[in-house]
Image (spheres, rainbow, N blue to C red):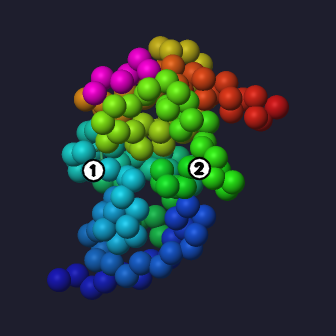
Amino acid sequence: MAENLRLQLEINGQPQTLLIDPRVTLLDALREHLALTGTKKGCDLGQCGACTVLVNGKRVLSCLTLAAQVANQSVTTIEGMARPDGSLHPVQARFLEHDAFQCGYCTPGQIMSAAACIAEGHAGSAQEIREYMSGNLCRCGAYSNIVEAIQQAAADLSREAT
Ligand code: FES
Ligand code: FES
């Protein structure tokens, strides 16, 4: 039995301390230890993208990241996406408007990945969005609506920035 590690990290802007087995993934730390169940486990093998979160603003697969690797770093999950006044982030709002989900299980990962895709500058065209969102699988086949939602959210965010 490995000795537990004490980790400090920032989750959705709040400092958190975890006392966990060093083998615990970031995904399981969020879900099982912090009760943040918005981040989903579709495969636990890095193949589906349902577990996508942001670490220091960059998208990562939390099933392939040990919690210990993100000590002292800043993690954003779907629960941290709404604005401080409670309004939805533009990516969330446009997903709703464009019906960019059905069962909703891939959706938190899609939304986190989409926010990063826009921030990376990879939302220039539908083709580019399809390519840079191809790490997030959707069995419900919402892909065309996801692309539309991302195009609209990218436009919203660039308007906000000017
Ligand atoms: S659960 Fe992480 S990629 Fe599938
Ligand atoms: S909305 Fe069901 S898997 Fe994407």
Give, as a single range, the part of the protein colored magenta.
140-145
In magenta stretch: residue 142 = yes
Q: Is residue 41 above or below residue 148?
A: below
- Marker disc for residue 143: none
Residue in the image at 32% along x and 50% along y: 40
Residue, disc 2:
82
Q: Is residue 111 above or below residue 132?
A: below
Which amino acid lies under the numbered mark 2 shown in the image of this protein? Ala
- Marker disc for residue 41: 1
**Label 1 near ligand 1 (CB < 8 Å):** yes
The kind of secondary structure element at disc 2 is: loop
Q: Is residue 26 left or right of residue 96?
A: left
Residue, far left:
1
Between discs 2 and 1, the one toward the N terminus: 1
- Between 73 and 103, the residue placed more toward the observer is 103
- Quadrant of the drawing holding the N terminus: bottom left
- Quadrant of the drawing holding the C terminus: top right
